[in-house]
């Protein structure tokens, strides 16, 4: 049985992860961490998540539960995740990281732990999205440089703080790599005013933020006479949470390294 602690347990994903762990036969809820100084420290994690008292109390530091868990699931913010990686490296723990919105510098820092921590890092933990990435690779390879304009459109709830979503960027990267392009050179993240017509090889991104949308992504391949759209719609955070718990069980048996959901789902070749 994999003992899992959840950092950011009072957050939207944190609470959903508690429910997902409840339903999983191979992993158990070993602890939950809230922000330092939070009034929720001391609360029962089950009650926090709305699944009823579970006898596990939220704490506001990892050190307080260091002996209780094997894998830490972290859906918080970049700097918090990096601090938790340092802790896990020091104490021989494993991590599942869902945090998005990392800068290039933060990504490099995360990567520097690959020799010290077995970690799964993915901007989207849903099985459906990871299958969609495979479909995008196939579509991009088949369509090649035959005059298809590529656009990525994503929509999320009004509270999301980063844009475009980590999933949209990942989708763009998969398509770009399949076409020997890079998002640094070909990604277009803003169009406003007299920005001129689109260029052939650019990959455009558009963002919607509204209401309670859990997460929707479409990649459009459009040319004269036809348009192909590959769409994934998440209707509940449970899809991300279940994927993260599956990743926690998987990473419990892995050597140090940086893995993604394609590895967990054995979609990497
Ligand atoms: P949220 O704001 O609801 O939750 C974040 C929680 O982290 C908050 O409760 C906050 O108090 C807590 N926190 C902040 N600093 C902390 C600290 N030092 N110690 C402990 N807890 C701390 O946000 P959310 O909607 O749950 O999303 C969190 C992150 O996960 C975002 O980056 C989001 O984009 C990402 N996300 C990823 C996936 C995926 O599948 N990979 C899916 C959904 C969301």
Image: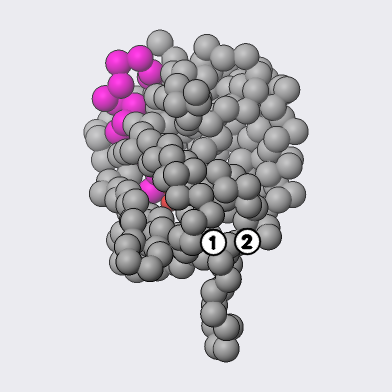
Q: Which mark is residue 186?
A: 2
Q: Is residue 64 visible?
A: no
Crowding at mark 2 (Cα within 10 Å: few <14, some 14-19, many 20+): some
| Marks 1/2: CA–CA distance | 6 Å
SS under mark 2:
helix
Q: Residue at x 44, y 15 (%)?
A: 2
Does residue 162 sit above or below 102 in this rendering? below
Whether the residues at callouts 1 and 2 have beta carbons within 8 Å, the answer is yes
Residue stretch in magenta: 10-28
Residue beneath label 1, please? Answer: 203
Query: Of residues 107 and 53, which is closer to you in this image?
Result: 107
**Where residue 139 appears, x then y in whole percent?**
42, 45
* Left/right of residue 208 with respect to residue 147 in the rendered view: left
Query: Of residues 43 and 193, which is closer to you in this image?
Result: 193
Q: Is residue 17 shown in magenta?
A: yes
The answer to which of marks 1 and 2 sits earlier in the sequence is 2
Does residue 28 sit above or below 84 in this rendering? above
Q: Residue at x 57, y 89 (%)?
A: 194
Q: Residue at x 62, y 14 (%)?
A: 255
Q: Is residue 48 shown in magenta?
A: no
Q: Quadrant of the N terminus?
A: top left
**Where residue 211 appears, x then y in whole percent?**
31, 66
Q: Is residue 80 visible?
A: yes
């Amino acid at each position: 049985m994999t003992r899992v602690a959840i950092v950011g347990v009072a957050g939207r994903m944190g609470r959903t992860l508690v429910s997902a762990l409840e339903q999983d036969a191979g992993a158990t809820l070993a602890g939950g961490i809230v922000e330092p100084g939070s009034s929720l420290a001391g609360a029962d994690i089950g009650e926090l998540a709305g699944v009823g008292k579970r006898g596990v109390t939220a704490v506001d530091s990892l050190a307080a539960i260091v002996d209780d868990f094997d894998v830490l699931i972290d859906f918080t913010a970049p700097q918090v995740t990096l601090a938790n990686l340092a802790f896990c490296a020091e104490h021989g723990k494993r991590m599942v990281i869902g945090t998005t919105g990392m800068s290039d510098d933060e990504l490099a820092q995360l990567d520097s732990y690959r020799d010290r921590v077995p970690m799964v890092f993915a901007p989207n933990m849903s099985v459906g999205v990871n299958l969609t990435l495979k479909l995008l690779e196939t579509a991009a390879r088949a369509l090649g440089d035959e005059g298809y304009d590529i656009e990525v459109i994503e929509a999320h709830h009004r509270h999301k703080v980063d844009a475009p979503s980590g999933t949209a960027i990942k989708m763009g990267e998969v398509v770009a790599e399949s076409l020997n392009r890079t998002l640094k050179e070909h990604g277009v993240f803003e169009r406003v005013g007299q920005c001129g017509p689109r260029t052939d090889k650019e990959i455009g991104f558009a963002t919607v933020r509204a209401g309670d949308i859990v997460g929707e992504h479409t990649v459009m391949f459009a040319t004269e006479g036809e348009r192909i759209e590959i769409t994934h719609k998440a209707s509940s955070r449970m899809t991300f949470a279940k994927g993260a718990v599956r990743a926690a069980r998987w990473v419990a048996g892995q050597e140090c390294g940086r893995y993604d959901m394609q590895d967990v789902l054995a979609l990497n070749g």
